[in-house]
Image: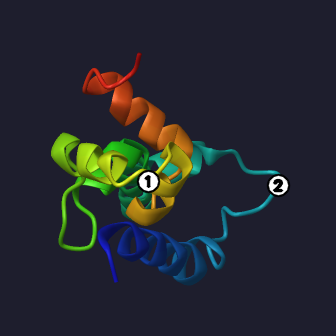
Amino acid sequence: MNRRQELLHEQMQIFENHCNICPYNEPEFRNSHCLGCEQYARLRKIGNDLLFDTSETRLNNGKGWKFTKEWYLALKSQGLNDKQVAKRARISTATLVKFKRKHGLTK
C-alpha cells in the first residue's frame, strides 16, 4: 500500500472506530467539541498530509521510478504524443502539462 492509501485507510479507521460512535456526533452539537479531541487532531493532520501530497509529489515518488525531463524527451523522440506519454507514465494529461510548464517544455 502506498502512503496515500495508508493515510486514507487510517482516516477511515478513525472515523469508523471513533467518530461514528462519539456522543458528540449528532446534528445538535457543533464541531467545537471535536477541537480538543486527539482523534480530531490526527484527522486534521491526515487531511493536511493528503492535501499537500500533490500530483507532482506522487509523480516523483512513483512505483520505483522518477518522471524526468530526459524520460519525457525520450518518449517524445519515439513519436508518442502527450496523451500517450501521460498514459505510459500513469499520470493525467493535466499533470503532464504542469510538468512541461515547470521544466520549460512548452512552446
Question: Which label number is shown at residue 85?
Answer: 1
Which residue shows up at 82% across the image and 51% down it?
28
Disc 1: CA contacts within 10 A as few (<14), some (14-19) or many (>=20): many
Q: CA distance from mark 1 to mark 2?
A: 48 Å
Relative to 50, does residue 25 appear above or below in the rendering?
below
Disc 2: CA contacts within 10 A as few (<14), some (14-19) or many (>=20): few
The answer to whether one can see residue 66 in this image is: yes
N-terminal of the pair, mark 1 or mark 2, is 2
Which residue shows up at 47% across the image and 70% down it?
8
Instruction: Give whichever of 30, 12 is nearer the camera.
Output: 12
User: Number of numbered discs present?
Assistant: 2
Name the quadrant containing residue 15.
bottom right
Q: Helix, strand, or loop for circle 1?
A: helix
Instruction: Give the percent coordinates (x, y) of residue 39.
Output: 41, 65
Q: Residue furthest right?
A: 27
Q: Nearest to the eye among marks 1 and 2: give it.
A: 1
Image quarter where the N terminus lies is: bottom left
Relative to 61, does residue 51 appear above or below in the rendering?
above
Name the quadrant containing residue 104.
top left
The amino acid at mark 2 is Pro
The amino acid at mark 1 is Val
The answer to whether one can see residue 54 in this image is: no
Which residue shows up at 46% across the image and 41% down it?
95
Residue located beneath label 2 in the image: 27
Image quarter where the C terminus lies is: top left
Instruction: Give the percent coordinates (x, y) of residue 61.
Output: 22, 60
Instruction: Give whichever of 58, 43 is nearer the camera.
Output: 58
Which residue shows up at 20% across the image and 47% down it?
68
Instruction: Give whichever of 102, 88 is nearer the camera.
Output: 88
Name the quadrant containing residue 46.
bottom left
Q: Is residue 50 left or right of residue 82?
A: left
Q: Helix, strand, or loop for circle 2?
A: loop
